[in-house]
Amino acid sequence: MKKTRYIFVTGGVASSLGKGVSIASIGALLEARGFKVTIQKMDPYINIDPGTMSPFQHGEVYVTEDGAETDLDLGYYERFTSATLGRENSVSTGQIYHSVISRERRGEYLGRTVQVIPHITNEIKNRILLLSQINTDLDFVLVEIGGTVGDIESVPFLEAIRQFRLDQGVENTMFIHLTLVPSIVDGGEIKTKPTQHSVKELLKHGIQPDILLCRTSSVLDADVKEKISLFCNVAKTRVFSAPDIDYTIYEIPQIFHSENLDKEIVRYFRMENQSGEYLQNLNPMLAKWEQVVDAFKNPQRRVKIAVVGKYMALHDAYRSLYEALTHGGFRRHIAVDFIKIDSEKLEDENYENELKDAQGILIPGGFGERGVEGKLLAIRYARTRKIPFFGICLGMQCAVIEFARNVLNFADAHSTEFSPDTTHPVISLMEEQSSIVNKGGTMRLGAYPTKIREGSLLADCYKVNSVNERHRHRFEFNNKYRQLFEEAGLRLTGLSPDEKLVEAVELDVRTHPFFIGTQYHPEFKSRPLSPHPVFARFIEKSAGL
C-alpha cells in the first residue's frame, strides 16, 4: 500500500482569492512530476450540497461521474488534473452533521454526549482518509478548506486538520495558506499587514502554515518575501507569489513552477529521489500547458458566440460552459468572444437586433419558466438563419419545443414543467420522477451511456458510436412524438442503450451547418488538454471552418 501525503489549502483576508484554481494548479504540477493526486473540497455551508441553491447564490452546480451535485471548484480540479472525482471529493458541514446526527439517532454513540470535538472533527477526518482508503495508489490528497480563516463556519474544519497533523505526522502533512498582499494604488506600495494578521488568525487555531501563497498584482520581490517570512514564521524559500494573470487561469501552473512551488513541496515531503525519476516527464507536460496558453495569446481568428441564458448576471453560473467553449477553440487557435444575453431581454425587445452579431448561438441548461420564450426566439433565429446552434439540457428541450411549434405547427407545444395542461407535451416528466417530493439529489444525475446514430453529425464529432456523458434533469423528450419529429426533419441521433430515452437531436447537415441539442451536459467533461469534440466542432463551424 502506497504512503499518501496530505496537503491542506486555507485562505485568508478575503474570499475569491483563487484557492480552487491554486490547488488545482498544484495538482497539475504534481501530476507533471508523475505523482497520482486527488483533490477534495470542504465547504462550510449547512446545505447537504449545492443542488438546491440558486446559481445566483453559488454559481453552477458541477456534476461528477457518480452523480454528486458539487461545488464548481470540483470543475477546476478535474480540468487541471486527470483525476475523476466523485461524491467523496465534496464535503459540506451539512453532510458532516447529517452523518453524526444519524448515528446518534441509531444509538451508535452508546449514550455519550455528542459534541463538535471529537465527534464532528472525527467525521471530518474520516472523510479525508476515505479518499486514500478507496484508492490506495494515491501519492497526494489535496484538500481545500472553503471560506476564509476567521469565519465561524470554518472552525470545525480547521480544528480537524490541526488534529489530522497530530494523527498523521508533520512529515506527511502540509499546510498552505493563500493570502492577500495588496498594493496601494496611488503609490504602488505593497502592504504585508493583511497577510501577517491572516497568519496570526490561523495560529489561533493551532495551525502554522508551511507555505504561503501570496495573491498580489505582480511577482513579489525578495525584500517583500523576506519581510513576510520574518513576521509569519515561514522560511523565505516557502513564500511564493500568486500574481494576477495576463491571459488565462491556465497560466498558473507555469507561474507556480517558475516560482519553484512544486519543487519545494517535493522537498518538504523528502521525495526528491522519487521525483527525480519523473523529471523527464515534467517538461513535456508543461509544454502542453504552454500550448494552451499560446492559443490564448496568439489566436489566428476570433468568433462571437451568443450564450442565451437566465443566469447571465453571474459568470460562475455557467463556468464549465464558458470554459468548454474556450477549450473548443484551442485546436484551431480560435479565440471565443462571448455575447451574454439574458433570455428575458429577448422577450421585451427586438430580439433579432440582440442576436445579429452572433456567429454561433448556445442555449444552456436551467430550471423554471422564466426566460423560456426568449430562448425559443433565439433558437428559431438560429434555425431559420442557418446559424450554428448548440442546445444543452433545457436548451435541447427548448429546441424540441420550438421545432414542434414552428415546423410541426403545434401552437401550444410545451414542456409539462412549464405548461402542465398543454395539448402537445413534447417534453414531459420522467415516469420515475413523478412521485418524488424531495428536490435535492433526486434528478437523473451522473454519467449515463448514449448510443450514437451512425452517419449523424454527432457521430462525426465523437468518432465513436457510444459515449458516457453526465446528466442533471427531470424532464425528457416525449416518446409519443418520435415519428412526427423524425418525419419533419429533426433527427433523434442519441438514444439510451435500451432506446427508451432520447439523449440528442439534430438537423441534417444538408439543411443546416450545425444544429445539435443534447439532454446531457458535455461541458462537464471538457478539459483544456482534451477539448470536448462537440464543442470543438461547434466553434469551428461558427468560425466558418
Image (tube, rainbow, N blue to C red):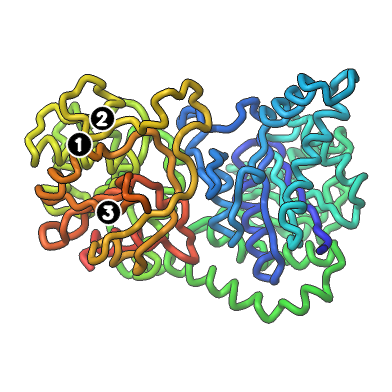
Looking at the picture, how far across and down is residue 110, in whole percent? 89, 22
Residue 354 in view here: no
Residue projecting furthest to the bottom: 280
Q: Secondary structure at mark 3?
A: strand
Q: Disc 2 or disc 3, which is closer to the eye?
A: 2
Residue type at the position of mark 1: Ile
- Label 2 crowding class (10 Å Cα cut-off): few <14, some 14-19, many 20+? many
Residue type at the position of mark 3: Lys
Q: Secondary structure at mark 1?
A: helix
Front residue of this view, candidates 10 and 143:
143
Distance (Cα) linking label 2 and label 3: 30 Å
Residue type at the position of mark 2: Ser
Quadrant in which the N terminus appears: bottom right
**Left or right: residue 62 compared with residue 38:** left
The disc at residue 415 is 2
The mark nearer the N terminus, 2 or 3, is 3
Q: What residue is disc 1 on?
A: 401
Q: What residue is disc 3 on?
A: 304
Q: Is residue 538 above or below residue 75?
A: below
Q: Is residue 177 above or below residue 260?
A: above
Task: Kindly check if marks 2 and 3 are in contact, taking CB atoms under 8 A apart as contact.
Answer: no
Q: How many numbered discs?
A: 3
Q: Is residue 487 above or below residue 439?
A: below
Q: Secondary structure at mark 2?
A: strand
**Left or right: residue 65 compared with residue 180:** left
Looking at the picture, how far across and down is residue 96, in whole percent? 72, 31
